[in-house]
Amino acid sequence: MITDQKFDILCLTETWIRPNEYVALNEATPAGYSYIHNPRLSGRGGGVCILFRSTLASNQKHYDNFTSFELLYTSIINPVTKKNAFSLINIYRPPGPYLEFLKEFSDFVTDLAVSNDKVIIVGDFNIHFEKLDDPLKKAFTSILDSVGIIQNITGPTHYCNHTLDLVLTLGVSIDNPNIRSQTSAHHYLISFKLHLSHNICTSPSYSVKRPITPFTAQQFTGKLPDLSTLIYSPIDPVELDKLTEGLENTFRSTLDVVAPLKHKIERQKKLAPWYNDQTRTLKQLARNLERKYRSTKLEVFHSAWKDSLVKYRKELNKARSAYLASQIEINKNNPRVLFSVISKLTKNQAGTEPQIPAIHTSNDFIDFFNSKIENIRDKIKQINITSSLSSGLADLEQNPVTEVRLEVFNPLPQLELEKIISSSNSTTCTIDAVPTKLLKQVLPDIIKPLLMIVNSSLTLGHVPKAFKTAVIKPLIKKPNLDPSVLSNYRPISNLPFIFKILEKAVAQQLCSYLQRNQIYEKFQSGFRPYHSTETALVRITNDLLIAADQGCVSLLVLLDLSAAFDTIDHTILLERLENMVGVTGTALAWFKSYLTDRYQFVRLNDMSSSYTKVRYGIPQGSILGPLLFTLYMLPLGKVLRKHDVNFHCYADDTQLFILAKPDDRVRLKKIEDCIEDVKSWMSHNFLLLNSDKTEVLLLGPKAARNKLSDLMLNLADFSATPGSAAKNLGVIIDSDLAFDKHISNVTRTAFLHLRNIAKLRNALSLHDAEKLVHAFITSRLDYCNALLSGCSSSNLNKLQLVQNAAARVLTKTRKFDHISPVLSALHWLPVKFRIDYKILLLMYKALHGLAPEYLQDFISCYEPPRLLRSQGAGLLVVPKIQRSSAGGRAFSYKAPQLWNNLPEYVRDSDTVSIFKSRLKTYLFSLAFGN
C-alpha cells in the first residue's frame, strides 16, 4: 500500500505486535522506508507505528505512559531546512470508560500546545464524531477548542458508518483529506497532503531614516538656535500658524545637521538583532582558534578553541537576554508592538501583520478610502430623499440637554503640559519635525515655545495649520483576511505628536465639563472616567441573567454602522456641541477650526499619495475623535427610550435588548419599530446602518427559547433570524450565557502566546518573563472575567489550565509537579478567586462613587428592622432569586453576596489600593489556606 500510493508517511494503529517482535514490521517495511513502533507493554492488541521515507529524518520523543490511550510521538525533520517541520503523534484509544481519558488527554494537549507550533495528531480515538449529542464527543471537542486544535475529518471512517479515526492539527494546514474504503480492514484509510514550507528570500526594500543615537539629544540641544524669538503670544490665527511653522522648521533644520536623513536598503535580516560588535569579535576569535587546531592538531589550540566557544556562547546569551529585556521595557505599554516583536523573534507568522502587496500604491488606497465614504454619503442622501424624519424624532433634537455653557478653554501651566507630554506614548508620526522619543529627551530646552503654541491655540480658538494633516496607515481588519483586497483595510490616522498633546489638553477640560454637568448619556460607556467595556458588559449581562431568572427571554440586537467615524457631518456635530452640550464662544471656534481645512494622505514604502481634503468625519486614531462621536450620538438615547427598549452604547457599538415572556411575541416585535426609528435617525445624521453585520441573539432558558424557534424579525430593510452566538465588545456571548465559545477562544489565544513565551524563556530573567506572561496571558484571563461567575466548573478549569501552564513556563516547573505550591509561591490567585476579586473590586468602586451610575443602581444598604450588631456593618441587601444558574450569577446578586461575606476590616478599607491589598490577602488565604 505505501509504495502503491507513494505515501511519504504511513501511521498504523492496533498493530498487535508485542515488545521485541520485529519480524513482521521488518517484512512489511519496503526498501527506502524506516519505522518506529510503540507496542502495548502488557496484554493483547494495541500498538502504534509510523512508517516514513528514509529521506525524512525523525526524532522520536518519549512521553510518560498514559493509562487510557497509547501514543507514538515523533518530530519530522524538514529535508530542506534540516529543522523540525512538525510534530507527528499517532494515538490509539481503546473503547470503554472515558473520564480518565479526558483528564489525561487534556493534560497532554495542554503541554503540547505550549511546546509546539505545528502538530498533527492522527489515530483511532473510538469517539463517535458522527453523533452530534454524544457526551464524549462534546467533551473531547471542547478540549480541542480550548487549545486551538482543529479536527479535519468528516464522514465515516469505519465499516459501520462511524467516524472514529481523526486527523487533528495545530498550526498546520492539510490539503485534500480523503477517506478510502477499499481496504479489508474495519477502519478505512485516510490520506492527506502536507506542504513543508521554508524561508524564501525577499527582495530588498528601501527606506529613509534618521540615524538617532544616544548622543543625538545632546548634539541637538547644542546646535539648536536661540528660541527666544519664538516665545511670544500671537494676536491672531495667522500669526499662530507662522509661529508653529517657524518652530517646526527650526527643529527640522537642526535635526538635518545632527541626524540627516539617509537612504537605507532594508535587506532581509539573517543576523539576530542582539548580535553586536563584542559577540562578532568573540565569534571570529573562536573561528580562528578552530582553524589553527584543525591545521596543527595541537591540544593547546583545541583547549583554547573550546574555552573561546564557551565564552562566545555565554556572551551571546547575555546579549540576547539584554536585547529582550530592552524590548519588553520599551514596549511594555504597547502590547500590539510587543506581540509583533515576540512573534518575529519566535518566527510565528500568525503574530505578524500581512504585508501589503506591491501591486497596491498609496494613491490606490487614498482613492479607495475617499470613494468609499462618498459612496456611503450618496447612499444616505438617497435614503433621506425617500423618507423624512418623523416629527417625534425631530422634536427630540430641539430640546437642549443643558443650560450651562463651556465658552473658553483655560491655558495650561507649564508643569501640566510637561506631565501630559511625559505620560504620552512615544509614538511618532512621519511628519513630526522631531521624533517623539528625542523630543521628550530635549523637552526642558523646548518646552516654552511648545507651551506658547498650545495655550495660544486654546485662547484664540484656532488649530495651527501644521497640525491639520494626517498620515493614513491602511490597517488590515483581521489577520486572516486577503491582503490584496482594498476593502479589507481600514484607514487609521497618524497625527502629529504635538497635535495629540493639544487634543489631550482640550479633552481633559471637555470631559471635566461633561462630568460636572452630567451631560453624558447614562448608558454610554465609551471613553469616560470609571467606565469600560467590562462595566458595560457587566450591566448588560446582569439584566439578561435576571430576565432569564424570571423565565423571560431577551432579544439582543447588536447594531453595526458602516465607517461611522468617517461619515459624521461637521455641521451637525458643531450644532450638537452648541445646542446639546453647551459649547460656545472661543471653545466652539476651536472645534470648528479642528474640523475644517483638514488634509490627509497615504504613505506606503516611503511613497506618498496625493493630498486630499477631508470633508466629513473625525480622524480615527485621534484623541478627541471617540469623545466627539459619543456627543454626536447623544439624541439616540431619547429615540430608544421612546420605545421602552433597553440599550447600551460603547462609542459606535450600539446594542438594544428587549425582555418578554416567551408567549409575548407582540412585545418582542416592538424592537422592529424601534430599529426603524433608529435607522431613520441615523440616516438623517449621515450614519448608515450595516445590515450585513448587524447581529441578533435570543437569550434565556432553553425551554423558553424553543417556543420562539420560528421567530423572524423584520429589522428596517432586512430580515433576521436570531443566531446562537455573537462577539460583543470582545466577549463572545451565547444564547445560554454559558460563555463556552468565549472561554475556548480565550484559552486558544492564550496558548498561542504562551508557546512564544516558552521559546524565549531561557533567555529571559524571571522578572521579564513574568512581564510577558502578565501582558499576554493574565490580561486575557482577567478581561471581563466578572462575567464568568457561576460558569461551569469545566469551563473554569480550561482557564485554570492556562494559568497552570503559564506558571510552569515561568518557573520552569516540570509538567507533572503539583501546581498549587507554584501558584502560591508566585502569589497568583487561581482563576475562580480572580473572578471574585474583580466582582468585589467593582462593588467597592460602586460604593465609593468610582464606578458607573448604572452599577451604583444595584447598591442597597442593609438596614435591620431593629437595633442589631449588624447595624452600620456595611452590609448590603442581597436580592431574592429563583434560579442559582441564572439570577445567582447576576452581578446584582453575586456582588452583595460576596461583599457580605468579607471580613469587616476588608470592607472598611479607606482607599482602592488598601482594599485591593487586603482583598487579595484574604482571598489568597482562602485559596491556599495560609
Image: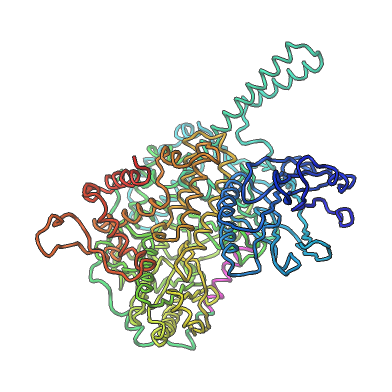
- Which residue is at a point 72% across and 69% down the rendered structure image? 161
Can residue 176 be seen at all in this image of the molecule?
Answer: no
- Which residue is at a point 26% across and 67% down the rendered structure image? 879
Q: Image quadrant of residue 225?
A: top left
In the displayed structure, 851 sits above or below 450; it is below
Q: Quadrant of the N terminus?
A: bottom right
Colour mode? rainbow
Between 17 and 697, the one lying in front of the other is 17
Q: Position of residue 437 (x, y in %)?
A: 47, 41
Q: Is residue 699 left or right of residue 88?
A: left
Q: Image quadrant of residue 423?
A: top left
In the displayed structure, 682 sits above or below 773; it is below
Q: Is residue 316 left or right of residue 219?
A: right
Between 456 and 864, the one lying in front of the other is 864
Q: Position of residue 384 (x, y in %)?
A: 47, 84
Q: Quadrant of the C terminus?
A: top left
Q: Is residue 618 left or right of residue 294?
A: left
Can residue 500 be seen at all in this image of the molecule?
Answer: yes
Residue 376 magenta: yes
- Toward the front, the furthest residue is 43
Residue 443 magenta: no
Q: Count every numbered label the image shows and give the total.
A: 0
Q: Position of residue 75 (x, y in %)?
A: 72, 44
- Which residue is at a point 52% across and 74% down the rendered structure image? 723
Q: Position of residue 363 (x, y in %)?
A: 63, 62
Q: Main secondary structure of the magenta part?
A: helix
Between 708 and 199, the one lying in front of the other is 708
In the displayed structure, 877 sits above or below 20; it is below
- Which residue is at a point 54% across and 62% down the rendered structure image? 491
The stretch in magenta equals: 362-378
In the displayed structure, 347 sits above or below 304; it is below
